[in-house]
Image (tube, helix red, strand yellow):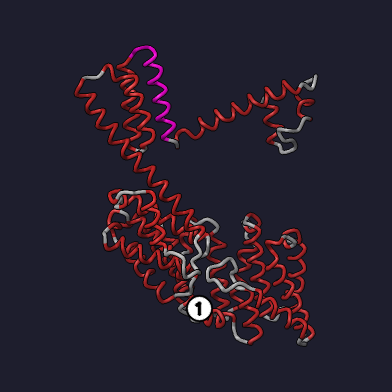
Amino acid sequence: MIRLFDYIKSGQYDEYDLTLTELLFSNASKNAYYQLKNRLIKEIEESLLLLHKPQNEEYSIYKLLQLVNVFSSKAEYDKSLFYLQKAEKLANKTNNTLVLNVIYDKWMDDIGSMMSETEIQGFEMKSLGNLENSLTEFKYKVLVSSLRTKLSKANFSSKSTQTIAEILDETIRTLKIENKALSSTKLRLRLNESIRNVLLIRKQYKELSEYLIEDFSRFENESIFESQIEEKIKQLTWIINVLLRLKRVAEMNIYISQLEKVLDAPENSRLSERYKWLFAQCKLISFTYNNQLGNAIELLESLVPEKDKVPHFPIFVNLNLAVLHYYNKNIEISLDYLAKIILDDSFGKISTPLQLTVLIVELVLRVENGDHFYAKNKYGSLRRKYRNHLTNKDYKRDKDFLDLLRDLIKDKQKERVNPVLLQKIKGFIEASPPFEPGSNEVICYHLWLEAHMRKITYFERVLQEIKC
């Protein structure tokens, strides 16, 4: 069995490779192999359960219920009741209404005859109360699921389409959800999360911003956030990010100030530490798009002493510093920060898209800095190293931009303007999606080409787009 496990784990064979029958059995018996494989699968499944049981409280509850069965079968009802009460306590702690139904069902079947009338009445009250709670929980799930389905099919660009509130009201009426259930903070937070996720996936940023801001205001007015501070932080970051996508920087700054106020409150010090880096990114965005580059650079440099607390710190800070110094027309300093990323031992371990992003930024800066010979060689090595990725359709935009950079380098070396290249650039710009702040393109390809053609800086073009 261990040999079979090692063969499959090596990657040379998969479980359906009949060569394994020859390696493991002298008579190449298929039946013996299938029996062995099934045994191995069973052992792995048992091992996984044992490995993860400390993290799974439901597993612990069912283990206690198995002990209830053991002692009930022996008619040792006092011990059976002891383990049943332990299971009930744990299920109540995790608010697991479905498991509580199982517990009360066992109580009724196995222990009921041993209970006094008072104990039975208390048990019945708990059982009925839990049944009502589990029914409400089920209705929550049906409501969220039904709403998610309707939102995913809604066409918000059509004038005849219902608003989110109307879709929600119609779903509630159809499912006959009581007002009492609708007042639940738990349900309202769950609905908020479900709606925002659907709208984000569909890239309905306008509708998402309206919904988030309205719901946030309602939660504030009803004091829901007083006991849900972390949820308030999460919703503020959602609002900030969606307003950034919509280029509504002035509004975004209002919510960044609110987030700062929440995190600065002494009673939220624990959460402040947890969300420190998220807030730093929000402030960085605000400083950058408000043309406060000095403040943005100072903020990033202040984070350096805490670099050990952040995964991929050299990428996060050095790439942002490189871009900020580029915006500030300090290309040599920017290239120094990029070199820190590329020469770091961790560079080869990061994802291929991120590697390409960094190297394309360096190539752009080399072109702007007039390092044409270096840029030409860099382009060649980049195309060779990532040729397999750049033939993939997912990288088509990167490939097309790189080819335009190559042609630009040739033109600059020959000191001429190629009308064919100008047409290619125009076609690339026209085919590009709208600029999205915070997208994966650290330098937006088509905005950079526009700036290059108009002989303005890339950052000037970005600020024009932000304020449009």
Position above or below: 220 against 190: below
When asked about the image quadrant of residue 60, the answer is top left
Give percent across and percent down for residue 387.
Answer: 76, 61
Give percent across and percent down for residue 327.
Answer: 55, 78
Residue 302 visible in image: no
Residue at image position (48%, 61%) is: 199
When asked about the image quadrant of residue 138, the answer is top left
Q: Which residues are magenta?
A: 57-76
Residue at image position (41%, 62%) is: 164
Position above or below: 192 against 45: below
Mark 1, residue position: 466
SS at circle 1:
helix
Position above or below: 390 against 286: above
Q: Nearer the viewer, residue 352 or 27?
A: 27
Amino acid type assigned to the residue bearing label 1 in the image:
Ile
Residue at image position (38%, 33%) is: 99
Give percent across and percent down for residue 95.
Answer: 34, 39
Position above or below: 411 against 77: below
Q: Which secondary structure class fits the magenta region best?
A: helix
Q: Nearer the viewer, residue 322 or 263?
A: 263
